[in-house]
Image: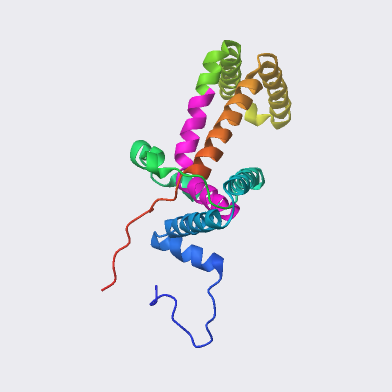
Amino acid sequence: MGKVFASNPLSLNVPDPAFESWLRDSGYLEILDTATTTSAAAVTTASAKETAAATTITHSLLHYLYTFISLLTVNPFAKLTTDDFSAKTPSWTREFIGALGSYSFPSSPHTLKLRVHENVKRYARNYASLFILFFACSLYQMPLALVGLISSLALWDFFKFCSDKWNWDRYPVIRQVLVRIAQCATLVVLMLLNVQMALFCALAISYIVMILHAAFRKLSPSKQPSRIR
């Protein structure tokens, strides 16, 4: 670390965003998670020796409640980029799920926010796969929605077939009118057969699973950086 951030006589501090960015690039971002968890545990132990047990329990419950409520204010997609979906999918058992010790309650709202942002970036492809799975299960539980989705796809496939056969590209006005009619027909089919309900259920369940997993999953080393001799 000393070779990256050189010491200076003025004892200037490195800004937190720059330090977190360096830790992320070096593969040591989990240090912040471990440090905050350890410091929080030390503070809790020290306060337990100085105060009564009932007061300590009350303070701990209020602290946990405040931290959990702060989850509602976190935007999990704040640092998500398209490059995160093009990366390699992390292992489901070893990295995404992990061992029992890979989970803990976040020690502070800052730790919770750090975990959510980093885990959503790291496991973006896993969460996307879970959404597809939940959407497929929703369609299985709602056969009419499945029929509506297939009907919509068949409608547009029939439109493409007719467009290629009769060369509707030569008549842009007529083609545009037919596209609008097809869009309205698709919307009516999707609404009548409750495809939007299946999509909403899949989105809701996927978001809950994603936000809880990202908040309670400890940050693990993203890579093993090479040592500089």
Query: Quick check: can you spot residue 102?
Result: yes
* Magenta portion: prevailing SS class: helix
- Colour scheme in the image? rainbow
Q: Residue at x 71, y 18 (%)?
A: 188
Nearer-the-camera pick, 57 or 66: 57
Residue 119 included in the magenta stretch of the image: yes
Q: Residue shown at 52%/15% (left/top)?
A: 140
The x and y percentages for residue 198 are 60, 21
User: Vertical placement of 137 versus 95: above or below?
Assistant: above
For residue 176, side relative to residue 13 (left or right)? right
Relative image position of residue 110 (x, y in whole percent): 58, 55
Q: From what the image shows, is residue 5 above or below residue 192?
A: below
Quarter of the figure that contains the N terminus? bottom left
12 relative to 217 in the view: left or right: right
Q: Spot the residue most to the left.
A: 229
What residue is drawn where x is 57% and y is 53%?
108
Q: Position of residue 94 (x, y in %)?
A: 33, 40
Residue at image position (59%, 54%) is 51
Front residue of 212 and 207: 212
Q: Is residue 155 above or below residue 127?
A: above
Number of numbered markers: 0
Q: Residue furthest bottom?
A: 9
In the displayed structure image, the side of residue 204 where residue 133 appears, left or right: left
Screen quadrant of the C terminus = bottom left
Residue 131 among those drawn in magenta: yes
Task: Write down the region rendered in magenta.
Answer: 109-135
Q: Is residue 95 left or right of residue 154?
A: left
**Residue 93's spot in the image, x, y percent?**
35, 36
Residue 167 showing in the rendered view: no
200 vs 191, nearest the viewer = 200
Which is nearer the eye, 28 or 87?
A: 28
